[in-house]
Image (tube, grey):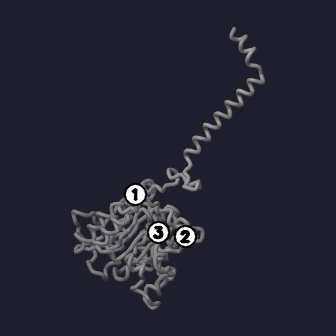
Amino acid sequence: HISLMWAVHCNPDKLIIFSSFLLVFILCVFLMQEESLISTDEEGNILPNLLQSEANATELAEKIRILCLVMTHPNNHKTKAYQVYKTWGRRCNYVEFLTTEADPEIPTIVSPTKEDYNQIWGKTKFGFKTAYEKYYDKVDWVMKADDDTYVIVENLRYLLSSYNHSDPIWFGCEFKVIVKDGYMSGGAGYVLSKEALRRFNEISLPNATLCKEDNTGAEDAEMGKCLMNVGVKSVDARDNFGRFRFLPFTPENHISQREWGYQDFWYYKNIKYPENPGMHCCSDLAISFHYVSPEMMVLLEYLIYHLRPYGLKTETLDDAPTKNRINSSALF
């Protein structure tokens, strides 16, 4: 009886109609699910899916491994160094304080050099030598900073995400004097790739014709000479709007520029690239500031990581997003 009813009531025409209806129904369900994944603004314009496009700082922290070498001295351990350790230093994969005395409250690399400003180059060489011996297989990048430098480590990782640590490169606030290829400001901090670290230790340091053997001299300029002599290339670290990311003064100094309101100021004359005036001086993804007191370090920690304007999506404030510059093809 069932087969008879099927033959009577389900001829080929009806079967085609039913199949078509079923196909349209399934397609509608699929499209409704797709539409639920698309966000729109009040005017119906499609917005990017936040779950898919949101930057993931945690993922970058696992992929881009950084050792932070912080230059300090015993008199600053309990103040500046400890404040670095409790704020931005803990966001590095590893952090070591380059000093001349051990301290149980902070991780230290104890240099045998004399604790004297004129001996900082020797202290720097020892720090990078120890970094190479102790961390070469653990990290991909090494950043040197001072104990009055404040670093937004997440922004540093974003910059480095566009580059390969196997290339001989380094980053920072670049000066165009003293060294033919330029050198990076020590106060704003500079970053060496794994390959740059290897060349510095294996080729440059052992050869007095490539790298200064005694411990005197300006550490940042001497580092520039040593790296240039082994083919390490400096990278333009500014963002896609030409705004600086490694900044050798405080945020207030750069924004107001009141400290160098004339073109004869040494900073104006020495920087490789011109600095934009006012709020456009500094990138929305700035990486570092210098001459930051322990009190200002706490203030920056609050302003960057805790303060939020309620209901405002800060990424919508600019007409175009801040991104890395595409300049790696011109390096080699």
Q: Residue at x 73, y 10 (%)?
A: 4
Res 10 visible: yes
Q: Residues within 10 Å of mark 3 (few under 14, many from 20)?
A: some
Q: Amino acid at mark 1?
A: Lys
The CA distance from mark 1 to mark 2 is 31 Å
Q: Is residue 257 above or below residue 103?
A: below
Q: Point out the frontmost of discs 1 and 3.
A: 3
Q: Residue at x 36, y 83 (%)?
A: 217
Disc 2 or 3, which lies upstream in sequence? Answer: 2
Q: Point out the frontmost of discs 1 and 2.
A: 2
Q: Amino acid at mark 2?
A: Asn
Q: Secondary structure at mark 1?
A: loop
Instruction: Identify the disc placed on residue 240.
Output: 2
Q: Residues within 10 Å of mark 1 (few under 14, many from 20)?
A: some
x then y, percent, for residue 131: 37, 65
User: For residue 325, what is the image quadrant?
Assistant: bottom right
Quadrant, the N terminus = top right
The residue where tag 3 is placed is 284
Tally the numbered discs. 3
The residue where tag 1 is placed is 138
Q: Point out the frontmost of discs 2 and 3.
A: 3
The CA distance from mark 2 to mark 3 is 11 Å
User: For residue 328, what is the image quadrant?
Assistant: bottom right
